Image (spheres, grey):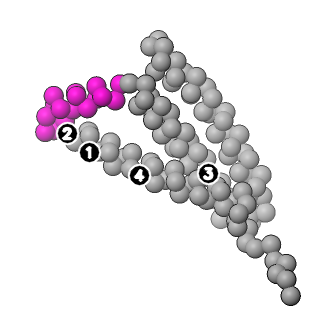
Amino acid sequence: MPNTSKGTLYRGREGMWSWVAHRITGIAIFFFLLIHVLDTAVVRISPEAYNSIMHIYKNPLMAMGEAALVAAIVYHAFNGIRIILVDFWKNGAKNQKAMLWGVLILWALVMVPFLIRHLMLAFGGH
């Protein structure tokens, strides 16, 4: 007898990809925070070393990394709200796909103006 089950709510569908992206962004944010605490702690050891580290961060490659970090934080925040709604709203699971589209639209609405301004500052210097 062939298996006609469609599986779970998340298996290979939008919910699963949002779950994967949520985990990846969470891990990326964690490692950023770890590095941030460590490089900020250097100021207590040697202000000159701290200034050298900060000078390294002022380049276009790091600006792209900052943009990726902000993109991860914004997605993680909006998707976290969606997860709360899926878990605690009685119609959350039924509407999770529509809410994911809402997350992606909100993410784009926040990121496009940020990226325009951030990249102008990073590459144009104004």
Q: Residues within 10 Å of mark 1 (few under 14, many from 20)?
A: few
80 relative position to 10: left or right: left
- Cα–Cα span, label 4 and label 2: 19 Å
Earlier-in-chain disc, 4 versus 1: 4
Residue 28 lies, in percent from the top left, at 45, 49
36 relative position to 81: left or right: left
Which circle, 2 or 3, is nearer the viewer? 2
32 is higher (above) or lower (below) than 57: below
43 is higher (above) or lower (below) than 82: above
Residue 58 lies, in percent from the top left, at 35, 25
Residue segment shown in magenta: 42-58
Which circle, 3 or 4, is nearer the viewer? 4
Do tag 3 and tag 1 residues touch (Cβ < 8 Å)?
Answer: no
Which circle, 3 or 1, is nearer the viewer? 1
- The residue identified by callout 1 is 38
Which residue shows up at 86% across the image and 88% down it?
1
Residue 30 badge: 4
- Cα–Cα span, label 4 and label 1: 12 Å
Residue 79 badge: 3
108 relative position to 28: left or right: right
Earlier-in-chain disc, 4 versus 2: 4
* Residue furthest top in the image: 126
Is residue 109 one of those drawn in magenta?
A: no
What's the residue type where badge 1 is placed? Answer: Leu
- The residue identified by callout 2 is 42
* Residue furthest left in the image: 45
- Cα–Cα span, label 3 and label 4: 16 Å
What's the residue type where badge 3 is placed? Answer: Asn
